[in-house]
Image (cartoon, rainbow, N blue to C red):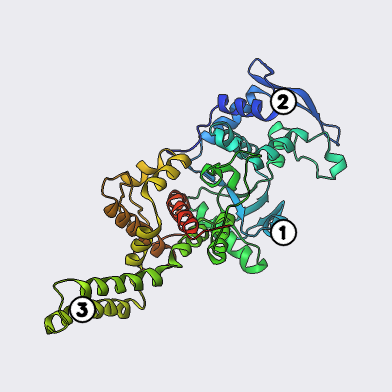
Amino acid sequence: MSGQSVINEASIVEGLRRVFRSIGTASGDFTLRDPISLPDGKTIHGATSAEISEITARLNDAKSRTESSFQWENEAEFSLVSLDQVGAFDRFFEDKTFEGQGDNPVTFKVGSPSREFAAYLLCKFVQNPVLLTSGRARMTLNRIRQIGSDRVALGRRAVEGDSLFDVIAEGLRATTLQITATKSRADFEALANSFLFHAAYNTDAAARIGLEAMFRPLAIQRVRRSQNGSLDAPRQTYDADLVHHYLMGVAAEIPLLEYLAYYHIAEHFFEKVFNEDLISQVRLGITDPSFSARRNKDIQSIVKIVTKIKGQIKDEGGVNEQRALKLVLDRFVSIPRLVADLDAHDADLVNHYANSDVPFAGASKVNIRGNDEEAVRGAIAKRIYKVRNALVHAKEGELPKYAPFAHDEELAREIPLMRFTAEQIVISQGKVL
């Protein structure tokens, strides 16, 4: 469970304080400064210490836990992320329950998070201050605070239940899949994926297991190059194709698409730099003082250079992409600037690349702070290219192999390296206005 949020009574209470801007407690209870009045006549005054303790115990009793799921003996809950921008999955399946059949039926329910899962998401906020700085997170917190004051005017549905955590669950506007079985099971994730396939097959509404972007620090922790109000007008124009790939990467919600969008920026120059490198090799050969057009062996040495390159192109169905990527890095990427960008984004990333392989891609460590920049660029090119190959090749039995969603957290760590590399390439092509 390394890297996961700690769940205890103190973190839940602190989360409640952050959300409701209140410090009112009595005998371990959490008391709201302004009670919440609901349209059905209910009034929520806070959360009792007994309820907070019960939720904490329930979460910590889970047999299995990931960043986006909790699994107990005969039930489980998974956070879902809709895979379309208009939220078709959420709208189609909201608050729907599907009863299984047979001797051991399984029930699937899609809707707002349970009280326990809402408390868990609360802990995610508290234990990572970066999450609290995002615009979407601030909007979410304000929405929760307003529940009870503008509900009737906005025509929202009533809170189901009378707990403060029910209010939070609705205000988060997150979606979870709750699965209940009549007996103990260990295959809840397989059941969840089965339901998601069944739903997509029959309705074209798709979702995946995972946390919404606002709960994932890597997805929202952008490099803030300009403070609000200090953004200048652009001073350069940029290649439209490169800009479009970059915008696709920034807008992508799926790590695979984001990574490949940035990779395509480097790929844009592969044939150009590869051919120019071949021309350069030939030019160096024929202009060398030791070269003589009268000696057959000298002519043959030039022929060998061209034949070797043509053989690689034939074998690989195109230019040697890893070699071409290295040439692109040589041409357009400053290693000191890359290190600075990575450090500004996440101070631990450079060390992560130096100490960690990429298991799903079979990619090796790379010491970006190394003294030999030529070797560093070669290692970066190799790591990036292997990750790219793992993303686009999915032959049965071929290892290593990227598993959609299952490896997203690992892939997310690779995106800054690819993104900041791509940014330097785009900027290198700029023309002064």
Between residues 260 and 312, which one lies in front from this camera angle?
312
Which residue bears the numbered disc 1?
A: 92
Q: Give how far across and how far down residue 422 sits, in percent.
A: 46, 57
Q: Residues within 10 Å of mark 3 (few under 14, many from 20)?
A: some
**Mark 1 secondary-structure assignment:** helix
| Residue 126 sits in quarter | top right
Q: Position of residue 123 (x, y in %)?
A: 57, 33
Rendered position, 175 above or below 249: above
In the image, what residue occupies the spot 40% across and 71% down?
Answer: 272
Quarter containing the N terminus: top left
Q: Nearer the viewer, residue 379 or 73?
A: 379
Q: Which mark is residue 117?
A: none
- Mark positioned earlier in the residue sequence (2 or 1): 2
Indicate whether 177 appears above or below 10: below
Type of the residue with mark 1? Phe
Please report contact status of discs 2 and 1: CB closer than 8 Å, yes or no. Answer: no
Residue 319 is situated, as x and y percent measured from the top left of the image, at 35, 74
| Residue 46: image tag | 2
How far apart, in angstroms, are the residues tagged by discs 3 and 2? 82 Å
- Report the residue at 81% width, 45% height from top: 156
Tell me if 337 is positioned left or right of 234 in this view. left
- Residue 396 appears anywhere in the view: no
